[in-house]
Image (cartoon, helix red, strand yellow):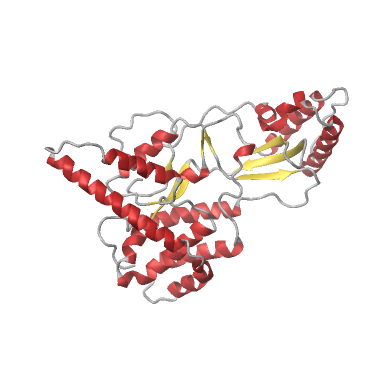
């Protein structure tokens, strides 16, 4: 939670945490890429070696999808007529996966087995989020809500928060079972531990931390109740337009709100979690950075817990190799004619979250915020 931006890289490598200040977090180190054969073994096909179902159906379904994907990408169809099950499927998959990777290094070819498919080829493409924590501070909204002169900006930001909470499904730190609720509870346990009553500075700082935690909790309950109101979604357009028409508006806020409104109107039911598919990537990894852990509302990125919370989160994440990110899946059980998902929603959303956090950070401090 650095002083220049709320968004920052997740640090996965082990490094000393002592003395690290906000703004010094380094980009995550990249692990050695997995061998391409893992695409076969990790993606639902291993049970075929002991498959007791209808092998004829499995082969028929698989080779139909093989024909479809080769037609779609204009690939050479592998000749595996001399091989028997399951080697024929493995060999042809390996060949096609290599051809797909040559076309697009960011795309993987897998074999899907689920309730509707026994063995169907599909392509996957992940959106690289840049190992970023998309945390949106709410303290500025709480302060604006306490001042009558800040009514317009408070109403606008509440509408944006309501969209992010109700439609995008962004977790809120005051919710039970949320990742940041657990982190703040951990901080509370640390703060309430016994202190040296003779150390005046330590005692005063603990009082500051306790005051912050109590305010954070009470404010969070109030804001969560407000942004949960479905009426905000009915009013979002009118709130955004009303603010944009104000002569004393802040242009940055007006433009940002219009962009959020346009995203909502184009994707009225789209959640940031709709294309998060941990069941399709790196099934061998038990520890994962889940989307609800790196996308969330939080209290503040500039208070007495800034460094402690930053260290706590980085310590949790630094040894985890896999980060759940949006995935575009294109099945080839039929010959596709549509263009695959291009991550338009996610790309625009993450950019807007970045801008929202950056704007809020300018007002994220102890004093009451200036007029916006």
Apparent side of residue 153 relative to residue 370 in the rendered image (left or right): right
Instruction: Measuring from the top left, give residue 204's x and y in whole percent.
Output: 17, 45
x 74%, y 28%: residue:
94
Can you say whether 150 is above or below 279 in the image?
below
Specify the quadrant that holds the C terminus. bottom left
x 88%, y 26%: residue:
81
Apparent side of residue 29 relative to residue 69 in the rendered image (left or right): left
Instruction: Measuring from the top left, give residue 244's x and y in whole percent.
Output: 45, 72
Instruction: Measuring from the top left, give residue 355's x and y in whole percent.
Output: 44, 56
Apparent side of residue 181 relative to residue 338 in the rendered image (left or right): left
- Report which quarter residue 344 is drawn in: bottom right
Instruction: Measuring from the top left, give residue 249's x and y in whole percent.
Output: 39, 71
x 40%, y 46%: residue:
181
Q: Is residue 32 visible?
A: yes
Specify the quadrant that holds the N terminus. top left
x 70%, y 40%: residue:
123
């Amino acid at each position: 939670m650095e002083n220049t931006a709320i968004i920052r890289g997740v640090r996965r490598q082990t490094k000393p945490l002592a003395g690290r200040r906000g703004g010094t977090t380094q980009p995550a180190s990249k692990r050695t890429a997995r061998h391409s054969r893992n695409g076969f073994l990790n993606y639902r096909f291993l049970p075929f070696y002991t498959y007791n179902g209808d092998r004829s159906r499995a082969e028929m379904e698989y080779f139909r999808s093989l024909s479809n994907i080769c037609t779609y990408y204009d690939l050479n169809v592998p000749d595996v007529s001399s091989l028997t099950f399951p080697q024929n499927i493995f060999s042809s998959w390996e060949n096609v996966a290599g051809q797909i990777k040559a076309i697009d290094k960011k795309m993987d070819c897998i074999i899907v087995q689920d309730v509707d498919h026994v063995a169907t080829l599909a392509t996957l493409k992940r959106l690289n989020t840049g190992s970023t924590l998309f945390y949106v501070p709410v303290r500025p909204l709480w302060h604006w809500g306490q001042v009558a002169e800040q009514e317009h900006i408070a109403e606008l930001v509440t509408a944006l928060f309501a969209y992010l909470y109700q439609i995008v499904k962004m977790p809120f730190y005051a919710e039970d079972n949320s990742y940041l609720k657990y982190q703040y509870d951990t901080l509370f346990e640390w703060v309430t531990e016994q202190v040296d009553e003779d150390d005046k500075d330590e005692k005063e700082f603990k009082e500051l931390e306790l005051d912050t935690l109590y305010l954070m909790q009470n404010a969070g309950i109030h804001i969560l109740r407000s942004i949960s109101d479905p009426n905000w979604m009915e009013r979002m357009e009118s709130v955004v337009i009303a603010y944009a028409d104000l002569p004393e508006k802040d242009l940055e806020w007006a433009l940002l709100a219009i962009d959020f409104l346009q995203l909502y109107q184009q994707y009225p039911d789209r959640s940031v979690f709709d294309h998060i598919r941990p069941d399709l990537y790196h099934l061998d990894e038990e520890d994962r950075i889940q989307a609800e852990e790196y996308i969330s509302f939080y209290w503040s990125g500039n208070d007495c817990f800034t460094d402690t919370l930053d260290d706590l989160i980085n310590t949790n994440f630094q040894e985890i190799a896999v980060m759940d990110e949006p995935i575009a899946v294109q099945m080839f059980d039929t010959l596709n004619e549509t263009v695959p998902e291009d991550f338009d929603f996610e790309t625009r959303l993450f950019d807007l979250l970045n801008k929202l956090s950056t704007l809020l950070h300018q007002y994220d401090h102890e004093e009451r915020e200036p007029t916006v």
